[in-house]
Image (cartoon, helix red, strand yellow):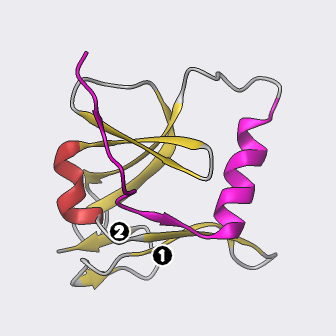
Amino acid sequence: MSTTILIEAPVKLTPSAISEIKRLMNEPDFDSSNRLRVGVKGGGCSGMTYVLGFDKVETEDEFFIIEDIPCIMNKSHGLYLYGMEIDWQGGLNSRGFTFSNPNASKTCGCGTSFAV
């Protein structure tokens, strides 16, 4: 398996996102062989949807580390995600990860779908 290791992370995580991801990684049933996958997939009201979750390394993945969090991203997704910031909102009205993508030409109201 050939995985590219990036010196500079293509995306940024805010301190609150880092805290939430580390909390999830410290859950008793967390599989420590998984990495944080950042990516995109087709679909959503604006054309593409963000992917954020724990997953196994695949052949076409690039590997990078943010604050001791091992991350992976398919090499072809960097075009859509380079420079994006991921945040965690822990409030009562808006709870979850949010994505601020400088590459998006259009986003949907829910903030999880975009077009380039």
Query: Can you identify the residue that label 1 sits on?
Result: 110
**Left-right relation of 115 to 92:** left
Q: CA distance from mark 1 to mark 2?
A: 7 Å
Query: Can you identify the residue that label 2 sits on?
Result: 113
Nearest the camera: 44 or 17? 17
Tell me where residue 115 appears, x and y as whole percent: 21, 73
- Identify the image quadrant of the N terminus: top left
Instruction: Please tell me whether residue 21 is drawn above or below residue 116 in the rendered image.
Output: above
Tell me, yes or no, whether the highlighted magenta stretch contains residue 21: yes
Nearest the camera: 43 or 29? 29
Amino acid under disc 1: Cys
Residue at position x 32%, y 46% in the image: 6
Q: Are marks 1 and 2 in contact (CB under 8 Å)?
A: yes
Amino acid under disc 2: Ser
Residue span colored magenta? 1-27
Residue at position x 36%, y 50% in the image: 7
Report helix, strand or loop for mark 2.
strand
Instruction: Please tell me whether residue 65 is drawn above or below residue 104 in the rendered image.
Output: above
Count residues near mark 2 (Cα–Cα under 10 Å), then give few for <14, some for 14-19, many for 20+.
Answer: many
Residue at position x 36%, y 79% in the image: 108
**Left-right relation of 44 to 12:** left
Tell me where residue 94 appears, x and y as whole percent: 69, 76
**Left-right relation of 39 to 95:** left
Tell me where residue 74 appears, x and y as whole percent: 26, 41
> What number is the disc on residue 79?
none
Residue at position x 79%, y 36% in the image: 26
- Identify the image quadrant of the C terminus: bottom left
Tell me, yes or no, whether the highlighted magenta stretch contains residue 65: no
